[in-house]
Structure formats: C-alpha cells, structure tokens
Amino acid sequence: MTAQVAGTRTFFDKVWDDHVALRLQHGADLLQIDRLVLHELSGSQAVRALADAGREPMSRGQVFTIIEHLISTRPGRGPNDSVSASGPSMIGTTRDASRRYGFHFIDYDDPRQGIAHVVAPELAIAFPGATLVCCDSHTSTVGGVGALAFGIGASEAEHVLATQTLMQSRPRTMRVDFDGTLPAGVYAKDMILSLIGAIGANAGIGYAVEYAGTAVRALSVEGRLTLCNMSIEFSAKYGFVPPDDTTLEFLVGRQFAPKGAAWDAAAAYWRTLPSDAGAVFDRKVALDCSALEPQVTWGISPQQVGAIGARVPEPQEAGDAESRLLAERALEYMRLAPGTPLLGLPVDAVYVGSCTNARLSDLRAAAAVLKGRKVKPGLQAICVPGSTPVKCAAEAEGIDRIFREAGFEWHESACGLCGNIGDNRFADLRVISTTNRNFEGRQGPKTRTHLASPATVAASAIEGCIADPRRYL
C-alpha cells in the first residue's frame, strides 16, 4: 500500500480510521458499524440465526429492516405477495423479528417503503462518514452520500446484530476522475459503463474507490448513487463520493438526519472528510466525459459495452485469452454476430427499475423521451419505481401518466425483475434495461439483457430496438 504524504489522508482513510475498534493482525481491523440494513431475503436468515444462538441484538436502534426483495411489484399487492415459494415465510420472519426486537421496520405498505439502497439515502439512514452494511452486494450505492458502505453475507449480518462490529481487511485505494462536461443525453449510467468498459470487470478487486472530478461534482446525489451502485460491477467492494454542499443540501431535513445543533455539529465534521490535497492513492484512473456517448452493453458482463453507434466486436479484439473466451461465450448466449450494429438491434422488452436507475430523476429522464409517444406495438414495457416516495412524487408530477399513456405498466416499488422476481416474464427475450447486471439468466431463463440509461431505454421502447435518446431530447 502506498504511503501517505505526512499530514494528508484520503476520505477513505479518515472514515476507516474513525471506525477502528481494534487493530488485528495481517492488515485486518475490527470496525464499528453504524448502520445495519436488512431485507427479507438474507436478513431473515440473519435474525433467525441470532435467535437460534440465543443472542440478542446489541444496538437495536441502529438496525433497519425493509420488505423489498421478494415482495411482488404488482399493483394491489398484499402483505405476503411474492413470486418466490419461500417469499412469504421470509417476509413473515423479518416482520416478526423486527417487531420483537424493536428494529426500525419498513413494511411493504409503509409510505417510506422501497429498495433498500434507494430508501437509505432518502431517509438519511445513510449519511457522510457512516459505516453501513447490508446483505446485498450493491450496498456500495449509498457511498453516493459519502457513506462507507459495503455488502455482507447473512453470517456477517448476524455478527453485526450481536456486536455492532465486523472484521475487515483494509483495502487499497483508487481514485477515478471523471472530468469534462457531460453532453446532452448522457448520464451517470453512461459514465460508469464507460469506466467498466475501459478498465475491465476485475479492475476493482481489493480497492476502495473514490469518484471525483468536474463531471462528478456536477452530478446530483442521485447520479452519484448510480455511479457508486455499479462499483461492484468492476469488483470494487466500496465506492463513494466524499460529501460536499450538494450532499448536505440533499440530506438536510430528512427523517434520520440530525436536527438543530446536532446537524450543525455533524455538518462541520462531514466537511472535514474529503480527501486532503496531495493525498496519495494506490491507483488513479482518469476519463474525459466531454465526448462521451450513450453506452449500451452487448454481452454478459458490464465490461462488454460500447457507444451506442458501435458494432459488436470480434472476440480477438477483447485482449487476453480469458476475455476472448468470455466474448465468445457472450456472442453465443446473446445470439449476436461480430459486426452487428448496436443501434437498431431489435428488443422484445424494456425495463425501467432497480437500485441503479429508478429514482425520480431517472423517471424524469425517461419521461422526457416518452412524452407524447408510444411504445412499439408488441413490446413488453415495465416501470418499477425505486421507492414508494419516488412513485408518489412521480405521480404528483404526472410522470406515471406519461409512462402509462406510452404503453408502460406502472408497478409498485421493489427489486422486481432486476433479479427475475417476476414469474419469468422476460424468459428467452432480448431486454434493454436500466439495471446493473447482464450475466446469463439474471433477468430470467435465457434472458438477453442490454444495460443502458433510462433515456436510452425509453428511446428503445419507442423504436422497438436499441435507439439513441439524443434524437428525442
């Protein structure tokens, strides 16, 4: 690990060091965990294991449970509606344990309900300088508000429940500078896809990644959340944007944010957290966003991506032998031939949803393309807002009418078809989606997923094929 210049530290160093309860051997530390977020899929396993072991939660006020993973997104859903056979049992376990232990509990019909990584920033459960864990790999999302957040397993969640601590090996640090000004029709999703395409899906292994640069500073918090969400797609466990005025303006007044004098004290501390000038990172990456185009994946890894006007590459263009084999596998699974243009490739379904791109700004971007237009006849088109507050805010603005009148289904909030929680509706179809993963079977058996921004997905809905959103804006 690169030595720091005396008197300078990165954001990561400051937050990590502030949470070390005990230095352990071989580069590991016992960290204090400020927030534990549990959903009904793996969270139910953690609370059941805790009870079976005869233990009690150590700090109940720091635990938040949310029904969001297995609950159906269908309009009019009931308290145990799930497309998974085990869903009702897991929902019931989480519900009962939350009430028994006195956790902060958000049920399916709570007006605050939504996908955990959308809800945590909305309610300021996540905040700058906090350590936050959840049984989900995309927990890094909330690094967009300056939290140090990472995904854990059910056994680790049980340990956090019992001790409010967790052993972690200290990672190396990486800084990614996105410079320049984003062109019209290009969004945070395009930034992160471009990065993964440039450095590869394994480049983040062992790193905590700080996103910086003029393009990042210009992003809203919602855009920053999208960047941090897909850190895991290039194998980084942690991704974050250090707090600034944009962060504080986003958090002030939210339910679990400090109030009054406590806010003033917290804000003063948060302003000390950004990386010091001259802080040393183990790796630096820079991308110029000035000429960035909308990005679309063509394969089964986010690194298999190109500008919307590109063609599917030949496998030998992929680089090393492993990447060439992955490209060959992708071409077979996606049923594509080298040289096929991405622009104009027919799709069977379009999906707007997930913890990556289903916030209000995402729905607004899609609606700006869809307004006054219709989905291509024969396409399935589904929108699942990221949270109930997002859904209600969109309905107050009339965004739901734009989606409905265009031909989209308008659903309740949950993880939904991002991970095929939805009766195999996309089985053996080609889908363009605002989600974060495109591996084989992710959205259903034999489903062939292309990842893109909400605006690109909306444009593709209109044309029935992968389409450039810039012509509609």
Image (cartoon, helix red, strand yellow):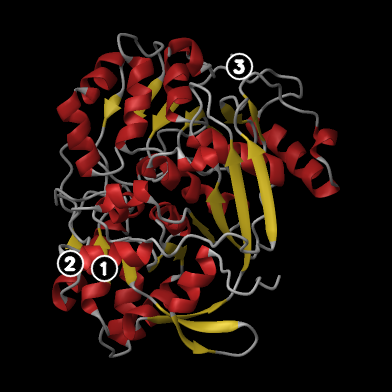
Q: Secondary structure at mark 2?
A: helix
Q: Quadrant of the N terminus?
A: bottom right
Question: Are there few (<14), some (14-19), or many (20+) residues within 10 Å of tag 2?
Answer: few
Of the numbered discs 2 and 3, the one sitting upstream in the chain is 2
Q: Amino acid at mark 3?
A: Leu
In the image, 137 versus 407, the foreground residue is: 137
Residue placed under numbered mark 2 in the picture: 261
Q: Amino acid at mark 1?
A: Ala
- Where is residue 138 drawn, in percent x and y? 46, 55
Relative to residue 96, is residue 298 drawn left or right? right
- What residue is at 38 percent from the left and 76 percent from the top? 33
The answer to whether mark 2 and mark 1 are in CB contact below 8 A is yes
Q: Secondary structure at mark 3?
A: loop
In the image, 165 versus 425, the foreground residue is: 165
Q: Which mark is residue 265?
A: 1
Question: Are there few (<14), some (14-19), or many (20+) residues within 10 Å of tag 3?
Answer: some
Q: Quadrant of the C terminus?
A: top left
Q: For the image shown, how many numbered marks are present on the structure?
A: 3
Q: Which mark is residue 343?
A: 3
Relative to residue 4, is residue 409 drawn left or right? left
- Where is residue 372 drawn, in percent x and y? 30, 9
Location of residue 441 (image quadrant): top right
Relative to residue 460, is residue 172 drawn left or right? right
- What residue is at 71 percent from the left and 70 percent from the top? 2
